[in-house]
Amino acid sequence: VPTDLFGLTFAEFAAQARARLPSGAGLASDLYRRTFRVGRFEPEAFPFAATTRAAWTQCFVATLLTVVRVVEEETDAGLTAKAVLATADGYEIECVRIPMGNGGDHTLCLSSQVGCRMGCTFCETGRMGLLRHLTAAEIVAQVMTVRATLGWQPRNLVFMGMGEALDNVDQMVQALRVLMDQRALHYSQERLTVCTSGHAEGLAHLAAQGWKRLNLSISLNAADDAGRSALMPVNRRTPLADLQRILAAYPQRRNFTLGVNWCLLPGINDRPEDAARIADFCRPLGRVLINLIPYNPGSAPIARAPSAAEVDGFVAALRGQGLAVRRRLTKGRSIMAACGQLGDIAQRARRRLRGRGDDATSDVASSGQA
Ligand code: SF4
């Protein structure tokens, strides 16, 4: 079975090439670089003998995902777009292009799993359950596909799409290694952000990589155990005191700023005492930036979207507690591409029906997605 090059660092690719293709390994560096430049594995572009070319093709592939559809929303903030991409075995995942507001630069929000098992009640993906983990090659392939097929050139990458990235930590870490490889896409750690709901084992594994310039953000959403456990079941396994201790011990560079994401849910987590509790939670964590995200109702809302006045009021309450706050503009809500809206809850049923050989397409045409 050919190995997918998108899941290999150059050193790993070269080692495999040396072992499997002694006569052609001298061009491994050029082949690797070209694959990431054009988005295809093309030994035919090199002066190999036909047998050597065939041997390369038997050993390696580079598999782009299939673009199923792209939905776009143009606002003053720029173009937000959601790409629905299909894996080779037919699962659909989503990644989102988010404008950064300066000259067309954008961030790409990546998926790490098909669905998610963390079960956060405000999140569309959480309602899907976990269908499967993505491989490192599939995670990298999201970036390669939007570059090669859609012409996007994402400046930053964030793991805030479908899935809990640290629940698939081995593959996610391998994908980061490839994305950072200077012969591949050469993303610096500062341009990469891992977001987690508070997966303790995954945080330990990530900390062990020693990547101090990598950005980290935590999805908090409630700063008391009862409230957080109700919104985010992960809190039952790792309550706030344990999470706070883990984050305080996380290796930080001197100017490291931990992102703390707070999805503002009117009537649930927008009281003045919530702002005070956030401040208490953050106090031992060094520099913190609160990312305030107005709730984006999905197909089964647990609250309404907050009004601008409610968001302003909570920003003021947080600042009154001495916290640095970034108010996230709502981008992509109309195309179900905003935070908490990714996912296709009908996908599990669709695959189950397919497995039985039924034609599922008409039954599940309305998934709640754009
Ligand atoms: S918010 Fe993140 S961790 Fe929670 S269910 Fe959604 S995708 Fe999973």
Image (cartoon, helix red, strand yellow):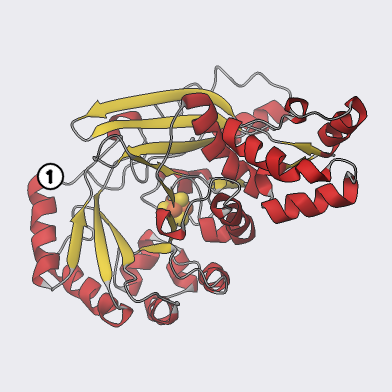
Using residue 368 as the reference point, say whether residue 332 is left or right of it.
left
**Residue 287, relative to residue 303: is it above or below?**
below
In this picture, residue 156 sits left or right of residue 30: left
Q: Which amino acid does label 1 sit on?
A: Ser
Q: Can residue 368 be seen? A: no
59 left or right of 139 in image: right
In the image, residue 24 lies at what x, y percent?
Answer: 85, 40
Is 361 placed above or below 204 here? above
- Front position in the image: 308 or 72: 72
Can you tell which quarter of the image residue 356 is in? top right
Locate residue 306, reporting x and y percent.
17, 47
User: Is residue 174 at all visible to an observer of this figure?
Assistant: yes
Judging by the rendered image, the residue that carries numbered circle 1 is: 307
Instruction: Identify whether 308 is placed above or below 199.
Output: above
- Using the image as rendered, state which of residue 42 and residue 308 is in the foreground: 42
What secondary structure is found at the residue carrying circle 1? loop
Q: Nearer the viewer, residue 334 or 137?
A: 137
Q: Where is residue 368 in the image (x, y as percent from the top left)?
A: 41, 30
Please state the total of marks drawn on the protein image: 1
Apparent side of residue 58 relative to residue 335 in the rendered image (left or right): right
Q: Residue at x 68, y 26 (%)?
A: 354
Residue at screen point 89% across, 25% down? 50
Residue 185: x %, y % from top left: 54, 45
Q: Quadrant of residue 244?
A: bottom left
**Residue found 49% across the figure and 21% down from its top:** 365
Q: Say few, some or many: other residues with alpha carbon within 10 Å of mark 1 (under 14 / 14 to 19 / 20 or more).
A: few
